Amino acid sequence: MILTLTEAERQIALGISVAVALGGLVLAAAGTQDTMEVHGWLILVFGAICAIVVIRDLWGPEPPRSRLESYYDEPIKAGIIASMAWAVVAMFVGVWVAALLAFPDLTFDGAWASFGRLRPVHTSGVIFGFGGNALIATSLHVVQRTSRARLPDQLSPWFVLVGYNLFCILAASGYLLGVTQSKEYAEAEWYADIWLVIVWVTYFVLYIRTLARRKEPHIYVANWYFMAFILVVAILHIINNLAVPVSLGHAKSYTIWSGVQDAMVQWWYGHNAVAFFLTAGFLGMLYYYLPIRAQRPIFSYRLSILSFWGITFFYMWAGSHHLHYTALPHWVQTLGMTFSVMLLVPSWASAGNALLTLNGAWHRVRDDATLRFMMVAAVFYGISTFEGSFLAIRPVNSLSHYTDWTVGHVHAGALGWVALITFGSFYTLVPSLWKRDTMYSPALVEWHFWLSLAGTLIYIFAMWNSGIIQGLMWRTYTEEGTLAYSFIDSLRAMYPYYIARTLGGLFFLIGAVIGAYNMWRTIRSAPSSAPVEGDVPLSAATAVARG
Amino acid sequence: MDISHDALVAFSKSWGLFYLIGLMIGVLIYTFRPSNRKKFDRAKQSVLDQDDKPWT
Ligand code: HEM
């Protein structure tokens, strides 16, 4: 992989690696009284490993000029592998925390294995590790293909990918150590946050530079979604993480927002993380890989543009539906509720657009599990956005808030929509990137599909049931006007559902493991359709290129 | 500078409405302009084009 960098790029890569390692050393020295020290050493080791990898090939041959006649896919391949690795680890932790709720002894008496520490490892691992790497990989693939232009250089995509994974590792390891700023989906502390800003701005610039090199005059709509994802996540991340560290030698920091403003900023962030991280980027995947796989153009291009602007501008205002019945001014809650309900329109426009694209290709959906992944993802996108708009209505939220219903909704979105569209895209991408005819085993893709679908259904039905039961038990009064059930009563009632949920999650995890195995075997198999060396007409052009 | 809560609310309730409606009109014009039709048709077909090389 280093050999695809030019010599000048290798030197810069080495410089960056050394700088990161030194940065780690400084953190370790400054934080000797603190958990930050561990992170300092971790960064040092990470930077050193990068430096060694670069040095090994530092003086290798320069990549041929003919590279400019093909797309730059090496970082995309690495991103897919990283994404699947995070998927397996983080979904395993997910099954573990699910089991903890039914069997609390599974912490094995370790502080690091308590629910409060493992849960963010799961959420950040799946959202940022699995989802984020998938988004980086697919966005760099889509932008090159639809712009008909190669990435502008070889170094910055690697910086984005490797730097991003450093952030994910810092986040996940920090939670196990007890490092957290207690903001949901933004738990990582200030030094990791600053690092992510640097990485993310590079990502944004890389994307713009590639678009600027495009040969196709019109920017295909999938890129709009990816751009919105990159830009808005940058804004959200920076504003929500404005914080002052206790001292430069401590991991702990305090946010500059206070009271209800902090809550509003956090859920403006949280909801738009759902909107732009977990929706816009994945819609970018949908609008590119679904037409490719179905071999049919998107049903209505105009509709895709309308829903793009609808989604970007409505989502921004919906965050306050997470704060119904709080100190937040009433009109702000109403605003969030109204925009959430309106959001149903552009959301269903996208889901409907995807399904109508398949009209005339249903036989392919039947035969091809990869396309079925994407079809079912679009259906779950429709279901979870309908459910979301419903939950955002204030009286409904008074029943659902604090209950497992929210968790059911989340996983209809996260498993049914986000993960399934990702798997569908990967099964399309892996054979094409590694130049194989098909996946190693189409039968295993089927297995993965049915396990995922079964797992998702078991999961969300369990949570719908338990959530509504919980909500009802908490608001049932006796004739004397006292609460009929104690909290413990409601907890006992949850027991069978928590076991069912663990089982559903386990199915989903097994599916992901099968998928990772299948991809790995595909990568390791011999390229079947590669042109045999020497089996090309020798023209002046090929002779020079081989030169 | 002293911005009262009420002033802010009045501002967002009026201005917020205007710019969102303005935006909507802009988007509708862009989407349905007849001269854009060819561009969009080309875009939706072009992703299916299977040549896997950058254009130079
Ligand atoms: C029209 C679209 C959507 C709307 C209006 C919506 C609305 C909501 C509402 C009202 C809640 C519960 C808030 C509470 O009571 O605390 C919620 C929670 C959540 N939703 Fe959605 N949702 C939508 C789509 C999605 C999608 C596609 C996903 C993808 C994964 C998703 C992920 C989540 C997550 C992660 C939470 C949990 C937040 C927490 O930790 O409390 N939502 N959403």
Image (cartoon, coloured by chain):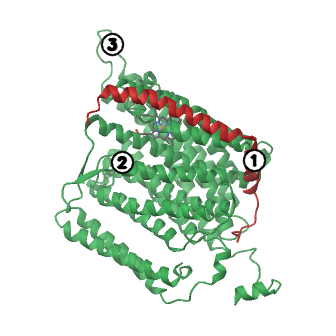
> Colour in which chain A is shown?
green
Task: Measure the alpha-carbon separation of dots 1 and 2.
Answer: 46 Å
Classify 10 Å Cα crowding around label 1: few (below 14), some (14-19), many (20 and above): few
The mark nearer the N terminus, 2 or 3, is: 2
Quadrant of residue A151 within the rendered picture: bottom right
Looking at the rendered structure, the kind of residue marked 3 is Thr
> Colour in which chain B is shown?
red
Name the residue at 43% across, 27% down. B13
Looking at the rendered structure, the kind of residue marked 2 is Ile
Disc 1 vs disc 3: which is toward the camera?
A: 1
Q: Chain of mark 1?
A: A
The residue that mark 1 highlights is A366
Q: Please say if the residues under marks 1 and 2 sit with CB atoms less than 8 Å apart.
A: no
Quadrant of residue B12 within the rendered picture: top left
Task: Measure the alpha-carbon separation of dots 2 and 3.
Answer: 46 Å
Name the residue at 29% across, 52% down. A180
Q: Is residue A504 visible?
A: no
Residue A239 bears which disc, if any?
A: 2
Classify 10 Å Cα crowding around label 2: few (below 14), some (14-19), many (20 and above): some
Q: Please say if the residues under marks 2 and 3 sit with CB atoms less than 8 Å apart.
A: no
Looking at the rendered structure, the kind of residue marked 1 is Arg
List x then y, in percent, for residue A36.
Answer: 24, 63
Up/down of A493 relative to A242, above or below: above
Q: Is residue B42 visible?
A: yes
Asked whether the residues under marks 1 and 2 belong to the same chain, the reply is yes
Quadrant of residue A46 within the rendered picture: bottom left
The residue that mark 3 highlights is A478
**Residue A294 in the figure: left or right of residue A434:** right
